[in-house]
């Protein structure tokens, strides 16, 4: 499963859990450039701009998560909390343990990392370990090459290629949301080296699915139509 893609669905990626069960459209290599001119679609689309300061979890969860992170001296200046998970279990010594996992989206150059997420695990109120993937830097610029009208055209084209006529009919005229950021094209491989491209995450404004990620050169990176096999 490409964990990071989960993170950054509508207002983050966590809404699209278990997306490996959705039908996907296989993309051409993400470093290639589409053949011909990318057309425009002047239907409804808006750009979503998010920051690490955005609060998208319950206030009580946010406050408690911040307290834990501060107690562990974990810098939060470039991270947004996506979700907080609580668990209570007995360990191998039959001791009751209380675990809190804080899932976060990282920002670099003030842009979100669209398909990778990190997590901090606390046990009984103390920092225990980290999971997921964190990046240290990105040398790419922050200026998109595609216009929003082109991004919309790419999305509708991906809908048409998904072999879901009902979805095409339902969503091709919907208002869309597009978020610009960095996408790790190596995500999902074991012990991989991060390789960023500039990219767009696109989905209907009132629904997390169908969701698509496009390289800023116009290439489809990943698409899910929301139909569970």
Image: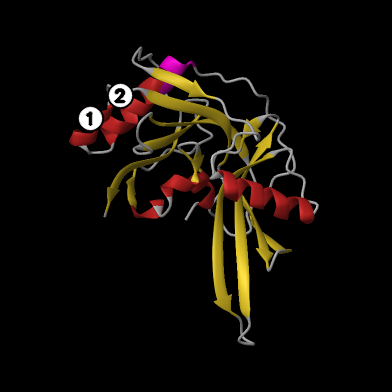
Q: Position of residue 152 (x, y in %)?
A: 39, 21
Q: Can residue 137 be seen here?
A: yes
Residue 51's x, y, as percent?
63, 31
Which residue is located at x 40 percent, y 51 percent? Answer: 19
Quadrant location, the C terminus: bottom left
Q: Is residue 149 magenta?
A: yes
Q: Is residue 177 left or right of residue 83?
A: left
Q: Are marks 1 and 2 in contact (CB under 8 Å)?
A: yes
Looking at this view, name the residue that lies furthest to the front: 60
**Range of residues picked out in magenta:** 147-151
Estimate the x, y position of residue 42 in percent, counting from the top left. Answer: 36, 12
Q: Residue at x 30, y 24 (%)?
A: 174
Label 1 sits on residue = 170
Could you say which quadrant of the image residue 206 lies in?
Answer: top left
Q: Nearer the viewer, residue 98 or 79?
A: 98
Per the rendering, the mark at residue 174 is 2
- 148 with respect to 60 (left or right): left
């Amino acid at each position: 499963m490409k964990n990071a893609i989960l993170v950054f669905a509508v207002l983050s990626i966590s809404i699209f859990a278990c997306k490996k069960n959705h039908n996907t459209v296989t993309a051409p290599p993400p470093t290639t450039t589409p053949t011909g001119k990318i057309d425009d679609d002047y239907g409804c689309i808006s750009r979503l701009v998010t920051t690490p300061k955005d609060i998208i979890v319950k206030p009580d969860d946010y406050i408690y998560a911040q307290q834990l992170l501060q107690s562990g001296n974990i810098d939060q200046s470039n991270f947004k909390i996506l979700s907080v998970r609580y668990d209570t279990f007995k360990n191998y010594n039959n001791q009751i343990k209380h675990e809190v996992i804080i899932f976060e989206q990282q920002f670099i150059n003030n842009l979100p990392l669209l398909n990778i997420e990190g997590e901090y695990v606390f046990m009984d109120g103390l920092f225990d370990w980290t999971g997921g993937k964190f990046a240290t830097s990105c040398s790419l610029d922050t200026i998109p090459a595609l216009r929003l009208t082109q991004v919309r055209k790419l999305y509708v084209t991906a809908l048409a290629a998904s072999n879901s006529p009902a979805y095409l009919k339902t969503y091709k005229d919907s208002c869309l949301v597009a978020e610009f950021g960095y996408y790790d094209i190596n995500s999902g491989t074991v012990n991989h080296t991060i390789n960023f491209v500039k990219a767009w995450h696109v989905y209907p404004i009132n629904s997390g699915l169908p969701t698509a990620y496009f390289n800023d050169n116009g290439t489809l990176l990943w698409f899910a139509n929301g139909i569970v096999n």
